[in-house]
Amino acid sequence: MKLRLSTILLSTGRVLTFPTSQKQPTTYVRRLYSSHNPSDLFSPRLNGLDKPTVWHEFSPLAQEFEAVNLGQGFPDWDPPPFVVKAMAQATDPLHKRHANQYARSYAHLPLANVLAGEYSERWGREIEPSTMVGTAVGCTNALFCALQGLLAPGDEVLLLEPAFDIYFAQVQMAGGKPVFCPLRPTGDSDTDASTHFTLYMSEFESCITASTKVLLINTPHNPTGKVFSRNELSQIASVLQRYPRVKVISDEVYEHLVFEENQPHVSMATIPHMWERTLTLSSTGKTFSCTGWKVGWAIGPPDLVKSMTAVQQWCNFSAPTPNQDAIALSLQQAREPYEGFDTYYKYFLENYRGKRQLLMDALKSAGMKPICPPGGFFIMADTSDIDFPYNPAEKTIAMPCDPMPRDWSLSRWMTREVGVTPIPPSAFYSASNIPLAQNLLRFAFCKSDETILEAHRRLENYFSNRNSQ
C-alpha cells in the first residue's frame, strides 16, 4: 500500500511532509522530533537548531483545526502573467536567451546588468555589474554566504529584535555570536509601527564591542512593519563612525512595499560614509509573488560582494540560470504600465494597501489594536484587551521558553477556538527580551481578499458572540 503524503509549506521556505492519514499533524511532528537525538552526529554549530521551530508547530496546528492561516509570510496567489511569461521565455530556445546552462557564479550577466542599472539610477552612484552585483538562491542564501564569508569564530553580529529567526541561526552556523538590541515599544498602539518600535541610540551603542563585526538591519522591518527613516539611519551611521571595524548587512526585501509618502524607503548604502561598509540584500520573491523561484542578490562595494560570492562558488556555485533570466526580464517589464497603473510597482503597492486595511479592520473587530505598518506585509497587533484562559504550564514542541509566553499561548488558543492562526512574536526575540512580545501577535496580509475576509468573519463572530454573553 502506498503511503499518501501531505505537505505544509513553512513561511521560511521549508516544507514539512507528513502522512495524509495523520489526523493530528502536530502529534506527528512531536513524535518525529522527540525520537531525534543528533548530539553525537551534528556539528556544534547546529546546537539547538535541529529542534522544531515556530513554523513546525503552528502550520500543522492551523491545518489540524482548519484555521485561516495568517501566520505564513508568502502570497497565496500566482505571479503576474508577465512574470510567468518571462520564465517560459527564459527556458525556450526559440527566444535565444541561452539560460538553460550554468550561470556565471557571481551573477547571470543579464540580471546583473539590469540590477546595476536600477541601483545606479536609484542611488545616484555607478554600480559596476561585474563586481558590485552578486546573485544567490534567494536573499536567505545571499545572507548565509555573506555571513560565512565575513565572520571569524567569536565575531559578534548585532541584531535588532524582534528579528527574523533565520538571522540568529545563520550567525550561529557561521561561528559568530548574536548580540541583541531591542526595538522598544513606546506604549502607544495608536502610533504607526515606525514610531511605536523605537531604537534608542544609547542602548544601541552599548551593544557594540571590540568583537562586533556586523550590524544586520532589516528595513522595511519584519515582523513589525517599521520603516527606518533617513534620520534614524543617519544616527546609526554616526554611531558606527566610532567603530570602523563594523560592516552593515541591510536586508531590504520589502523595499517596494512602503505605503506612506512621508516615510519612503531609504537604503543604508545611501547614507554618507556608509556605501563602503554596506552590503545591501534584496530579492523579488515578495514583489513578484514568486517566493519559490529563490532569486536574491547583494549590491555593494566589490570587497563586500566578494565575501558572498567567494562562498557561493564553493557550495551552490550559482543561482538557477532560468530563474535569474526570468527575473531580469520581469524587472524591465515591471517598469511599464500595468493594469491601469503607471508601473507594476504602483499596482502592486495599491493592491497591498487594500489588503492592509482589510486586515486592520478584521483585527479591530476582535478587540485588538493593530499597530499600522508603513511597510512590509505583516501587522503586529496589541492583544492586551483580550481575555483568554492563559495556561503558562502548557508544554509544546517549539515554545521558546518555560513557562509558555502569553503570546504563544494566545496564538494556540486563537487557532483552536477562533479558527484564525497568527504567529507569536516571541519566536523573534532572544530569551531576555521575550517579555516585550507578551501582548503582541503577528498577522500576515499577503493573502487573497477572500482569505482575509474569512478571517474577519471568524474573528468578529467569535468575539461579538462572546462579548454579548
Image (spheres, rainbow, N blue to C red):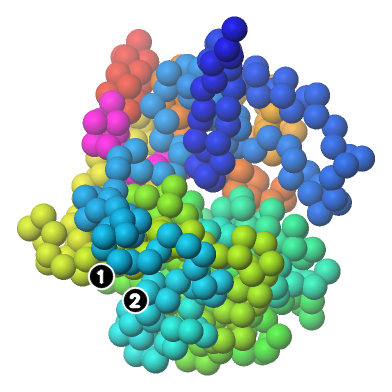
Q: Are marks 1 and 2 in contact (CB under 8 Å)?
A: yes
Question: Of callouts 1 and 2, which one flags the residue occurring earlier in the amino acid sequence?
Answer: 2
- In percent of width and height, residue 468 lies at 31, 14
Please tell me whether mark 2 sits on a helix, a strand or a loop. Answer: helix
**Disc 1 designates what residue?**
332
Please tell me whether residue 50 is drawn above or below residue 253 in the rendered image: above
Q: Residue at x 74, y 40 (%)?
A: 50
The residue lying toward the viewer, choosing from 140 and 391, is 140
Using the image as rendered, state which of residue 338 and residue 243 is in the foreground. 338
Residue type at mark 1?
Gln
Which residue is nearer to you in this view: 8 or 354? 8
Q: Nearer the viewer, residue 12 or 266?
A: 12
Please say whether residue 235 is one of the residues in the magenta stretch.
no
Going 72% across and 24% down the picture, which residue do you hit?
32
Q: Residue 388: horizontal and vertical position, in percent?
A: 51, 22
Relative vertical location of residue 343 with respect to residue 40 in this rendering, above or below: below
Number of residue marks: 2
Crowd tier of the residue under label 2, counting other residues whose Cα lies within 10 Å: few below 14, some 14–19, many 20 or above = some
Question: Which span is picked out in magenta?
Answer: 438-454
Q: Residue at x 72, y 48 (%)?
A: 431
Percent x, y of residue 105: 56, 71
The answer to whether 114 is drawn above or below residue 346 in the figure is: below
Say which quarter of the image contains residue 196: bottom left
Mark 2 lies on residue: 114
Q: Residue furthest right?
A: 40
The image quadrant where one finds the N terminus is top right
> Can residue 413 be seen here?
no
Q: CA distance from mark 1 to mark 2?
A: 7 Å
Q: Is residue 445 magenta?
A: yes
